[in-house]
Image (cartoon, helix red, strand yellow):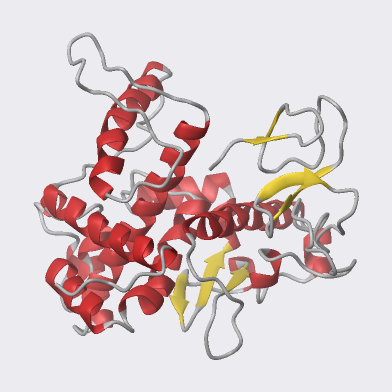
Amino acid sequence: MRAFSCPSCRHLVPFEAVACLHCGTTLGFAPDAGEIVAADHRAPCANQFLAGCNWLLAPGEGPGDLCLSCGLTGTRPHDADLAADARLAKAFREAEAAKRRLVFQFLELGLPLMPHDGDRGLAFDLLSSRAGPVVIGHADGIITIDLAEGDDVHRELMRRELGEPYRTMLGHLRHESGHYFWTVLVEPDPAATEQFRSLFGDERSDYSAALERHYQDGPPAEWVSGYVSAYATAHPWEDWAETFAHYLHIRDTLQTAASFGMLVTGPVCDPDLIAAPSREPEDRFEDLLDDWLPLTYALNAVNRSMGRADLYPFVLSRPVIAKLTFVHSLVRSVSLGRRIPAP
């Protein structure tokens, strides 16, 4: 994510800022401008307090309207339930905060984004499993998230139970959005579909049977040689969604590093491990990778120095890099208004 500054005093402010701590200016994020702006002449999102939303409405929109991000939320807990349950309210706010970061990244990447109208578009159902079972997933443009994932204890228990090295609310949203963007970026284009099948496999194979087999037998022993995660082995659609999520991880982290001027000049033993992330979008995925790998080596080492797990605990094998390159070509083609080249 880009770094933001107060429009009045130019001091650094976070993406979630509602006021500048240096000069006191009331702030908010304006999605139409893509910037943190002074909130003087814009109405706040109607979910300002309920969801902790700091997004502002576009000129012409008035009090009571929802911002672009909150407007994508379909079903959610009732206001009275959120008011009565502090843990549920916290989880809901965490989910909405992660969604705002996701929507911001879609805007930055130039990915098409429109609210669900019953036939197409995107929506998020944020449900509580306290009221009954909730299956995290995507179907027909609607992404369903279990708000229990906003609880640190629950999320850590699930991460350990499933043997995952990484599990976050933002990670869930990125993965499930991958399923949605498969229907936008791949499915409508025969050339893209052909390339997808050559890299990920045939998505027409029985999805339910594949998931049942995965949960019963687990991933293949040598899965790391061809997949970004164990779950990616379950089915070509899951491989795509996991790869798409990692692509978003990479792009967002590199943008943050570039925005803060982070450089890796290499350790003494290997001075060729250099990373100088660019503030401008890279046309080739190879250039992203040249910065990503040295950056993760350095950040993983820093985390270990603090007794923490690796920031990015994944291996990018050659087949995974080929898949990420395919995702990059699709995203760049859409953002630049180009057609996907035939294989």
* Residue 307 versus residue 58 in the image, above or below: above
Of 269 and 229, nearer the camera is: 269
Of 237 and 207, nearer the camera is: 237
* Residue 150 versus residue 296 in the image, above or below: below
Write the residue at 39% across / 20% down.
302
Residue 218, image x, y percentages: 19, 61
**Image-quadrant location for residue 178:** bottom left
Of 32 and 220, nearer the camera is: 32
Determine whether, in the image, residue 175 is placed left or right of residue 61.
Answer: left
* Residue 114 versus residue 156 in the image, above or below: below
Determine whether, in the image, residue 151 is placed left or right of residue 58.
Answer: left
Write the residue at 82% across / 37% down.
19
Determine whether, in the image, residue 132 is placed left or right of residue 247.
Answer: right
Residue 249, image x, y percentages: 40, 47
**Image-quadrant location for residue 330:** bottom left
* Residue 272 versus residue 76 in the image, above or below: above
Write the residue at 31% across / 57% down.
328
Write the residue at 87% across / 36% down.
25
Of 14 and 156, nearer the camera is: 14
Residue extending farthest bottom = 119
Determine whether, in the image, residue 141 is placed left or right of residue 9.
Answer: left
Residue 216, image x, y percentages: 21, 68
Residue 153 showing in the rendered view:
yes
